[in-house]
Amino acid sequence: MKTYLLDLHPDAYPLEGYRRKQLLEWVFVQGVAHFADMSNLPQNIRAELEQTYALSAFSKVEKFPSTDGSTKYLYTLLDGRQMEAVLMPYQDRVTICVSTMVGCPAGCSFCATGRMGFGRNLTAGEVVEQILYAARDQGWQPSTIRNLVFMGMGEPLLNYQNTLNAARILLHADGLGMSQRRITLSTVGLPKQIIQLASEDVTVKLAISLHAPDEETRKKIIPTAHAHSIKDILESAREYQRRSKRRVTFEYSMLAGVNDHLWQAELLAEQLRGLIAHVNLIPMNAWAGSGFASSSEQRIQEFYDTLEKLGVPVSVRRSRGRDAGAACGQLALKRPADAAA
Ligand code: SAH
Ligand code: SF4
């Protein structure tokens, strides 16, 4: 079987010296899909690479454009399993949201991916290729996509090494040369892994899916809350902040009647004291059979105002791609027509 080239760290790429740099440039700067197109490499080298290495782990790709300009990519892997990425062009930047797993073992009750259960971890290359493929499909060089969020399917800190290796590959100066400041890792909140992450060579931005400031509510919607207390999660966030010197984002999906009481906004503000934090309110994205509804616009505004008044930096995330089944929490391999509730 061929070796999947994208799984390798750039320092471990085949070829020596300037030839290796040329190869990296073809893969990460030009974004070509075939060794045959690497025109400044001699024919015999191209043929050898072709024999030993594979440049893709995708057997099929479907895409679902949204009316808001974002595009959902549904990737089928060589073993037939599937996962998704969402490409989101904004006025001043392009962001991609990638998956780190097929499905997710965490099982959060409002998340369609969680409802699917766990398929398997993605390899580092399978994470990296989501970006290379989407750029190529748009007719762009990969560097057009400058912002990366690990917020697709899966819990990145439960696929720790592969996720981190994917970041290392994307950051490498001879390859894509992404910036650490433009990579955000979103986690359900696993204190041990967050503390470990704080000591890595790579310091990405951290987003923690808190979703409730009180244990009772959090345990109702997030199974891992039974194992990890809010106190421990916040302590690990402080540690991450001490080492990385970065602001930590707290995600808060607004679920009507569940976590949107104003006392919860007050308690949240209290919990976050002492942290340089930012709260991102996410209106719940509906999906068939979830049993949850989004808080009303009015309640979201009240929750927002309460946090703001208490001095907590807060914003509302308007999820992209709802009509393509591409919004936060909707990734479940559904065709757009089936995705919305
Ligand atoms: N596993 C990671 C990253 C993927 S989920 C995590 O949980 O953080 C990305 C974000 O979308 C998380 O904050 C998640 O809680 C949120 N989310 C999940 N389902 C949602 C839904 N239906 N509506 C709104 N946000 C949702
Ligand atoms: Fe997994 Fe995140 Fe969905 Fe929870 S919200 S099930 S951790 S992908």
Image: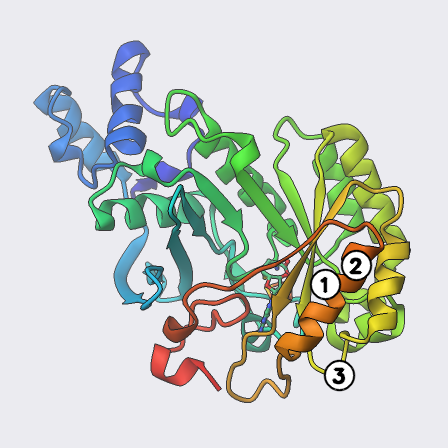
The amino acid at mark 2 is Leu
Residue at coordinates 18% horizontally, 28% vertically from top-left?
48
Instruction: Left or right? Give the position of 170 relative to 211.
Output: left
Spot occupied by residue 93 in the image (x, y as percentages of width and height): 40, 42
Residue at the image position 72 percent from the left and 44 percent from the top: 248
Image colouring: rainbow
Marks 1 and 3, the one that precedes in the sequence: 3
Find residue 182 and report its horizontal and vertical position in percent.
52, 37
Reply above or below: 40 against 30. Answer: above
Q: Marks 2 and 3, Cα distance to the nearest angstrom?
A: 18 Å
Write the residue at 25% across / 15% down. Answer: 19
Give coordinates of residue 95: x percent, y percent.
Answer: 43, 47
Determine the secondary structure under disc 3: loop
Q: Mark 1 points at which residue?
A: 304
Please identify, in this view, whether the residue under mark 1 or under mark 3 is nearer the observer.
1
* Residue type, numbered disc 1: Tyr
Residue underneath mark 3: 257
Left or right: 195 with respect to 157? right
Instruction: Say what secondary structure mark 2 lies in.
Output: helix
Cβ of disc 1 within 8 Å of ligand 1? Answer: no
The amino acid pointed to by label 3 is Gly
Is label 2 in contact with label 3 (beta carbons under 8 Å)? no
The extreme top residue here reads 17
CB-based contact (under 8 Å), mark 2 and mark 1: yes
Q: Work out whether residue 52 or residue 173 is closer to the camera in this orientation and state it.
A: 173
Where is residue 109 shown, x and y percent of the image?
67, 77
Q: Nearer the viewer, mark 2 or mark 3?
A: 2
Residue 286 occupies quadrant: bottom right
In this image, 19 relative to 236: left or right? left
Is ligand 1 within 8 Å of the beta carbon of the residue shown at mark 2? no
Residue that numbered label 2 is attached to? 307
